[in-house]
Image (spheres, rainbow, N blue to C red):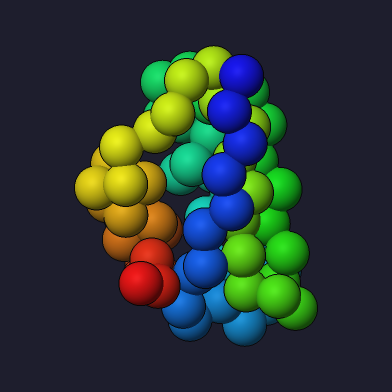
Amino acid sequence: MTVDTYAVKGMTCGHCVQAVSGELSNLPGVRQVTVDLSAGTATVDSEQPLDRATVAAAIDEAGYELAD
C-alpha cells in the first residue's frame, strides 16, 4: 500500500473536489482519494506507487493542474 499527497492548482469549490476525486479514483489500483480544498491537496491511497504523469493526466482531465 502506498499513500502519496499531491498539490493541485485551481481548486476553488466542492465541485472541484468531486471532479479531482472522481478522476483519481478511476486510476487502476487506487483504493481511496481524499481531497483537501483548503490545503489544495489530493491524498491518494493506492495498491502500488502511481506514475506522476498518470496522476497529472487525471488531474488535467478534471480541469486542474498538478503543482510541481
Q: Is residue 49 above or below residue 28?
A: below
**Position in image of residue 55 (x %, y %):** 36, 46
Residue 15 shows in the view? no
Q: How many marks?
A: 0
**Position in image of residue 34 (x %, y %):** 71, 48
**Position in image of residue 1 (x %, y %):** 61, 19
Residue 47 shows in the view? yes
**Position in image of residue 65 (x %, y %):** 36, 70
Report whether 38 appears left or right of 16: right
Residue at (44%, 29%) from the top-left corner?
A: 49
Q: Is residue 55 above or below residue 11?
A: above
Residue at (41%, 21%) from the top-left corner?
A: 28
Residue at (59%, 53%) from the top-left corner?
A: 5
Report whether 63 appears left or right of 22: left
Quadrant hosting residue 67: bottom left
Report whether 39 appears left or right of 29: right
Q: Quadrant of the C terminus?
A: bottom left
In-front residue for pair 34/17: 34
